[in-house]
Amino acid sequence: MDHDLDAHLADAAAAIVAAVDLDEVRALDAELLGRRSVISTAKKRLGGLEADERRDAGRRLNEVRAELERLLDGRRTELESDERVHRLESERLDLTELDRGRRLGHRHVVTRTWEHLEDLFVGMGYTVVEGPEIEDEWHNFGALNFPLGHPARDMYDTLYVDYGESMSTLLRTHTSPVQIRVMETTGPPIYSVMPGRVFRSDTADATHMPVFHQIEGLVVDRDTTFGDLAGTIQAFTAAYFGADFESRLRPSYFPFTEPSAEFDIRRPDGSWLELGGCGMVHPEVLRACGLDPEEWQGFAFGFGLDRLALMRHGIDDLRELFRNDHRFLSQF
Ligand code: PHE
């Protein structure tokens, strides 16, 4: 009997190791430990043995049974963990493909120029203020000393908005109306820059667009002089373009500044580029904003951001900035 049990245990152990899945282990469990198993049958026969023999045979049967249970449990655990690994492996998502060729975008050249200028002026102690793109006639013209019917209004090809009284509402033609808004809402001293989008009824060509960007500067303080204006323009030119760039002012005319000037910058190759307008804030403009010109003086300047971006990056057609051709824009 012992011999038979040893052989049975050896066969069973081999079968258990060979089991390929949990179903097979379950079937072996029933076959080796169930009611009709070799063990159960042998146990039933114990009753017919002598007491001594019965005790030894019974102990041996229990040992074999315990060994079979241990082997079955072990194999079951093995297969369960195999199955888990297998399942994880089969459910795994390969995401590496998505990462291939990934490209991050970046801010548009004009946005970067805009932010760069804000940073420069903030560094010089200015605040940044923005105003509305749809303006009323008063802020865009009236308060800036362009009386109704004044020929200087024709300098701007204004796009009017069909709202309220005829020609009372428009798309701002420059950022200068924000000067008025700043003076109306905050008292002097004022040191502010006002970047934004402006609109003119222009046909798009290499140097004109119906929508473009300007940045306006306004300083109002006691004893502000034209020298402060020239110094500020020069400080900005050197900070933005580099120490080898120079600026110059040429007499000009704007209704809201007196005296008025255009300012140019000189490139290292000696050529001059016209950048924008500037001047001392006209006393009528200060008065329109409730400030006494005897007590307060100021200067203002305004220039186009797009042209600055073109120049800095050596782009020769303004329209490229608005075409949104990724192949073009990604170069900058
Ligand atoms: N607003 C003027 C323009 O767009 C520029 C300017 C701004 C001139 C401030 C003088 C002072 O042409």
Image (cartoon, rainbow, N blue to C red):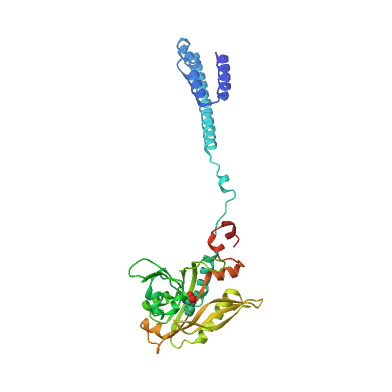
Looking at this view, name the residue that lies furthest to the bottom: 294
Which residue appears at 57% of the width and 45% of the height? 97
Which residue appears at 58% of the width and 15% of the height? 3
Which residue appears at 49% of the width and 16% of the height? 37
* Side (left or right) of 149 relative to 14: left
Asked whether the viewer can see residue 216, the reply is no
Quadrant of the image containing the C terminus: bottom right
Asked whether the viewer can see residue 26, the reply is yes
- x and y percentages locating residue 195 in the rendered image: 47, 71
Looking at this view, name the residue that lies furthest to the left: 164
Nearest to the observer: residue 289 or residue 20: 289
Nearest to the observer: residue 211 or residue 167: 167
* Count of numbered tags: 0
Which residue appears at 53% of the width and 26% of the height? 21
Looking at this view, name the residue that lies furthest to the top: 48
- x and y percentages locating residue 126 in the rendered image: 47, 76
Quadrant of the image containing the N terminus: top right
Looking at this view, name the residue that lies furthest to the right: 269
* Side (left or right) of 10 relative to 222: right
As drawn, 105 above or below 111: above
As drawn, 200 above or below 144: above
- x and y percentages locating residue 111 in the rendered image: 51, 65
In terms of image quadrants, where is residue 236?
Answer: bottom right
Nearest to the observer: residue 91 or residue 167: 167
- x and y percentages locating residue 329 in the rendered image: 57, 60
* Side (left or right) of 313 relative to 163: right
